[in-house]
Amino acid sequence: MTEKKQLAQNAITTMMRKDYFSQWLKLEIVHCGPGQCICRMKVRKEMLNGFGILHGGVTYALADSCFAFASNTHGRLSVALKATMSYAKAVHRGEILTAEATEVKKGHRTGIYHVFVRNEEGETIAVFDGTVYRTDRMVLNQTDDGV
Amino acid sequence: MTEKKQLAQNAITTMMRKDYFSQWLKLEIVHCGPGQCICRMKVRKEMLNGFGILHGGVTYALADSCFAFASNTHGRLSVALKATMSYAKAVHRGEILTAEATEVKKGHRTGIYHVFVRNEEGETIAVFDGTVYRTDRMVLNQTDDGV
Amino acid sequence: MTEKKQLAQNAITTMMRKDYFSQWLKLEIVHCGPGQCICRMKVRKEMLNGFGILHGGVTYALADSCFAFASNTHGRLSVALKATMSYAKAVHRGEILTAEATEVKKGHRTGIYHVFVRNEEGETIAVFDGTVYRTDRMVLNQTDDGV
Amino acid sequence: MTEKKQLAQNAITTMMRKDYFSQWLKLEIVHCGPGQCICRMKVRKEMLNGFGILHGGVTYALADSCFAFASNTHGRLSVALKATMSYAKAVHRGEILTAEATEVKKGHRTGIYHVFVRNEEGETIAVFDGTVYRTDRMVLNQTDDGV
């Protein structure tokens, strides 16, 4: 494994250890690398909204975790400034969703990421576009005390 | 109580009954009216991310539920098309957040809503801007079978 | 040429004829097809902002025209509801920018499009994410009287 | 006049001097102050799109200039990272639009601004939400050489 891929894995493992909400989502890391992450999640009853479909906040949270992991893979602690979610298709209980984050820009101070959320048929469920601020701190030193 | 305010309350009560994710958030409706909603939520350990602060997906979900309630108060079943979240301040365990949704536009087919999320000191934590598509169906007839 | 590609070209030609602002931009259509469009533009002095770089509103307008063309290629008159622009890199006078729009979703009533704006080196300058409402009217019948 | 209001006016005057695109828009500054700006503009033929209404890129540009002015009133040179535009109503030739920017957050490194665009009847035409990165440079020193 390359050093950069190792760094990416260490950052995500460190973040995931205390990421209680991603644990509640039962989010699974399928792949990671520099600027990239793929996550998977199964839709459970407690994730539904009042119309019997997946709550938009949960779809967003899956994409947001994937975005946070991808943006922190370089080791620099990065925090979300702003994100946009576009919904393409309703999702039902029992479906398995996959989120895939790619890096559009890695600048000195900011980064831009796209996340596609797809169902098992490969249909796009939602698209997410997020911007982070890249701090001077390192992921590996910051998780005990919070940001 | 006016007829319009009664309609707003009935729509939200109907949605909330089966909104299992808003129930998990322990989201409380503080106020509602035509095109408006105020919700409150306490930040619990299982809502935190790997940096020990509130997961951005949970902040979004609070705003998104408030937006969904506000946009459905007129009785027409409305679904989210797209939303944007801007983060202003980190939030910690134990804090109580209040989301307030107001109607920017109510058109024939679409609606635009702003949500401010504030902490107990009244500081803005996050701002949310969402657009819905207003279907021809009514909220009160649709919740048994899903959308 | 296929019938669908012909329909796309006719829609864009019809729109472009009276699109005085895209004409001011000297926007050139490089390619179009169903759900797709590629446009090109050269940065002129009158497009700059007070810091001597391309005004963000002009970058947006290039992406927005490309998005409008792509979303109307199916012949159904489509209007923008909401769009998000993320800026990746400053642009200077004399640079040639290319915008490429792709269709993320084409639904019954709404559509989602991504636009990447790149410079001559192929670097991403900005990314745009837009949602349209698809009306029942046809592009070819509507341009004389406005919408 | 207070010192802060004077600083705001100087920043905007400095920016406007070489803002050739805002000059093309014939954008007029109605009011400014720390974190605030109100601008006005008349819709001309060359601002229209192919459907005979105001091009969405021009509406955005009006809001974007107003946002840029408001975010630079504190004297720290600030650059746009990301912005979202929601369209509420079509605009026709001859209408006079007013954009009003307010500060939602002024942080150490980033700022969040809302802009409402209204017509002469006070109806909301569009709403804009933008985030800036606040550099260490000062507005008054930077406009000769660009950023």
Image (tube, coloured by chain):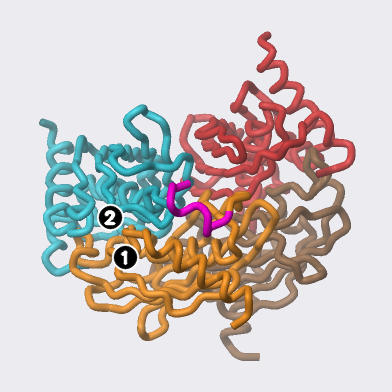
Chain colours: A brown, B red, C orange, D cyan
Q: For the N terminus of chain A, give its image quadrant.
A: bottom right
Q: Amino acid at mark 2?
A: Glu
Residue B60 horizontal/vertical position (percent): 61, 46
The residue at the point 57 percent across, 48 percent down is B83
Give me the C-alpha separation between circle 1 and circle 2.
8 Å
Residue behind mark 1: C23
Would you say residue C143 sits in the magenta stretch? yes
In the rendered image, is residue D109 in sight? no
> Above or below — where is A130 with respect to C43?
above
Mark 1: few, some, or many residues within 10 Å (few <14, many ≥20)? some
The residue at the point 39 percent across, 61 percent down is C60
Describe the element under mark 2 as helix, strand or loop. helix
The residue at the point 52 percent across, 37 percent down is B114
Q: Nearer the viewer, residue D9 or B146?
A: B146
Q: Amino acid at mark 1?
A: Gln
| Marking on residue D46 | 2
In the rendered image, is residue C44 in sight? yes
For the record, the magenta segment spans C138-147
Kindly check if marks 1 and 2 are in contact, taking CB atoms under 8 A apart as contact. Answer: yes
